[in-house]
Image (spheres, helix red, strand yellow):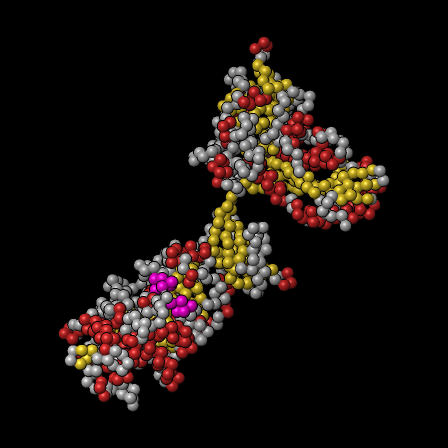
Amino acid sequence: MQALRNLRHILETIAQGVEVLPAVGGAVEDLERPDFEEREDQALNEEERVFETIVERSTDGTRPSLYRPTPPLTRSKRHLFRYFLDGSFRSYFLGTLLEHERETPVHFAQIGACVLRREDNGSVRREVLEIRNLLLAGRKRLSSELWSKLENVATMADIRLVDLEERDIVSGVLSDFDLRNKAAGKVRFEMHNLEAELIRRVLPKLGLDQWLVVDGSLQFQPTLSDLEQSEIIKPVLGVAKNFRKDPQFVFGRGPRAERRSIYKLLADLKPYHRTAAFGARQGKLVFWYVRLREQTQVDYPLMGVVKAELVNPSLEAVPSELIDLLSRALVAERSVTPHGQDRRWHAHLYPIFLAERAIKESLVSREVVQQFLKWR
Amino acid sequence: MSESTERPVIGLSSATANQPNSSDEFHFWLAPEVIVNPFDIVEAEQVAPGGEKSHTFGIVTTLEHSTDAPSHLSNFISNDFGQVSTEPNTLRQGTTVARVAVLSNDQDIYMPVMNDRPVRFADEKGIHVALGIDQVPERYRVPAGLIAMSNGTQAVVYLDSRYILGPEGAHVNISGISGLATKTSYAIFLIQSILQKVENRDRIGVIILNVKHGDLLSIDQPPPRGLDPEQHELWEKLGLTPKPFSNVRYLLPYGKDTYTTGRPNSFRLPERNWFTYAYSLQDTYNKLDLLLSNIPDPWDTVGALIGEITQGLSDPKTGQWGPSGKWKGVHDWQTLLNGEPLVKDGQAQAVGDVRAQSVARFRRLLRRIVQTRQTGIFISQRPKHVKNLSEEIARIRGGETIVVDIARLADDEQTLVFGDILRTIYNLYAEEGSEREDLPEKVIIFVDELNKYAPAREKESPILEQVLDIAERGRSLGVVLFGAEQFMSAVHERVAGNSSTLVLGRSGSAELSSPVYRFLDPAIKANISRLQKGELILSHATFRQPVKISFPKPAYLQEGAT
């Protein structure tokens, strides 16, 4: 609440120097675009569309098959996944600042990331939860005098001032020149940074049976480079509910090589099975798909499938047994589901959903923000 | 309340958009592993002036478990689409929420309990604050039972004697299904508690009607094998001594074979201090209205004839028995029924304004009650050793308990005896109470199956009038009615309504849906249908909510325990 009080003073400061076109009634919540995760995946791997390298090997030396059964490995048999990370945010459009011919939208956002730890009995508790406040505006759209004034008051109020125009890997996805559209990407970028910070914090606690499951891709920097630091695979698994639908997969070599679109690949993926693991980014990243649910139980064949990612610093083939183990543990996560509470329930892991809930519950409510953040 | 910090927090108060807290109730979610039951008394931290803390006490009424599953379908799907053996990896988020009815605040602050305030089990002192017992001076406290909470805390529940024996309120009504042997036991326990604890207890007289078997015909004898140690402990925890009644007089009805055997018409004989009573016409002529209470009399013809008879058999100068004039020949039941002035030459005669036809009906009714179907209690002349009940009752002294046995009497006879007792006591106090120093200050009258004498929806009858007189005016006179019945809905609402203390044993849900239970929270009603033997719900004038209590087994000899 203190952040909002401080922010109110900032708004007053801004309003003294420039003309303001306030959002009607105060702050308006920006709604996240659907499937942003998928678009992000696409943007981060724009140059790679065809995956043909199978980056796994079995200890018995047999050639990995395209599909492998991965029956559920529940917590009571082997409790592999102990930590679950998710990030979330809420962003508000506050209005547009007009300074002579220049104009910039102003947004307020709260970003958060949370790691939950799962105990032996299946209950979860909060390991770490971090919430941060952001004020976003286009730096070049304002006079440097006003910007530095803003920077000063924001620093004093413990709110980070973010330049909407600064290029980054995520907000670049939306190349729209309307800064207001870019804000969501910028906030996501900041949220990913916070997630990366939390992963770094949790890393020392991880071990062979103490894996961390991260919501979404591990391709984000600095997470990717953090996990590449040593030769061995860090016990961190990225699990994406939504992923790009344009890649092609080549299985086998020579004239008998089989080429499949992702639709074809996943349509033939049986429940509690995984695909072979493919390499991306020259083998640094290993990914595969796991079907958590029967196709008949969901609306569309591509539903009920998650994309799993592992950072592979050695660039050598990953043991199939490890991928099987992780996939089996993932299949066991299909129960409980957030059915009825999230449209992505079929691919959503319940502990991740809980981490997201924990963050959302810690954010200031919309009503409070809307009442506090009005231009006076 | 510094000790509150030592007691563990069992949950935090919770207020939501749909379930706000109010001055009357609050909610709290329970920490995992904590067990709470309905009727547990808890305390929540509350604000107080100057940033201090006060404590709001409340009684748990309902417990609900909810999860984040928006529908049962979600749970079905979560279990892998209906696989009953599925083992979920993560436990679904769920919590048990207790709804608490506010009892009191130790600083009289009735602000709604805020969100996220620590909640603890109340300790014994807290329970007393919650129920307002701390406001009752020691000398007025009557132990009424024990509250036992889920965490093992026990607290003695005290009633305020000013609300049982007057002057603030009076009377106790006990209801519940039969078979649990709880109603009578509790009434007798409460009487014992009063006789052991109330100041001026030797100025209290007790009249107990034994209506079933011989249970109450040996209340001055200890159980043959004594009490179990746990029961002993329970008595002592309540600050009472487990002992039988002392100074008891038993009045047993005269029966058909009493003349030959000398044995009264009772299921069992008390060991000592018992007397038989019977009704001759001389004892009954001015109580015929009570005897004929159950007879429909829409045109008051029976009433008019009873008036004529009472007047005719009274000495106009003294108002006492003294037939004169045309009533001169009437000296017992036989001469009343078959002689003048009611009958001449075998034909019923008109008496005063009452026509011969009505006199004939009266004779038929009275003959059936006092001759054909009687149990032997109506006799021609009382032998010397057989007592007049109302005279015996009128001789009651402080500290004395009189047990009147009516268990084997016919319904009309029971009504006469009960009515006779009530009328005698009422007249004793209403007319000459202040003048007689040897009268007890208070008289407690206990009767089971009160609904027989004061049924609901009864228009008017002499016995009902008598019961209502006691219920409504007994408080100021010092006459206190302890009534018991299976169904409170079957008793006249003015009787239960005038009782400052209501005690409820297990009752069925159909009974509990009756309007007389509207003072109870629906959740409490649900719990009443699940009460165990020895458990009761106690609603007292000074409590804001009913509480659940248990009480010890009787410390006197009960039938079947020989």
What quarter of the picture does the C terminus of chain B occupy? bottom left
Q: Image quadrant of residue A191?
A: top right
Note whether A237 is above or below B251 in the view shown: above
Q: Nearer the viewer, residue A214 or A257?
A: A257
* B111 on left or right of B328: right
User: Percent position (x, y) of residue B88?
Assistant: 48, 36
Note whether A372 is above or below A98 in the view shown: below
User: Percent position (x, y) of residue B37?
Assistant: 45, 53
User: Percent position (x, y) of residue B247?
Assistant: 30, 75
* Residue closest to the far left: B260
What quarter of the picture does the N terminus of chain B occupy? bottom right
User: Percent position (x, y) of residue B151?
Assistant: 46, 54
User: Start and end of the magenta stretch?
Assistant: B484-497
Residue found at x 47% / y 53%: B62
* A30 on left or right of B327: right
* B7 on left or right of B511: right
Residue found at x 32% / y 69%: B453
Residue found at x 53% / y 57%: B25
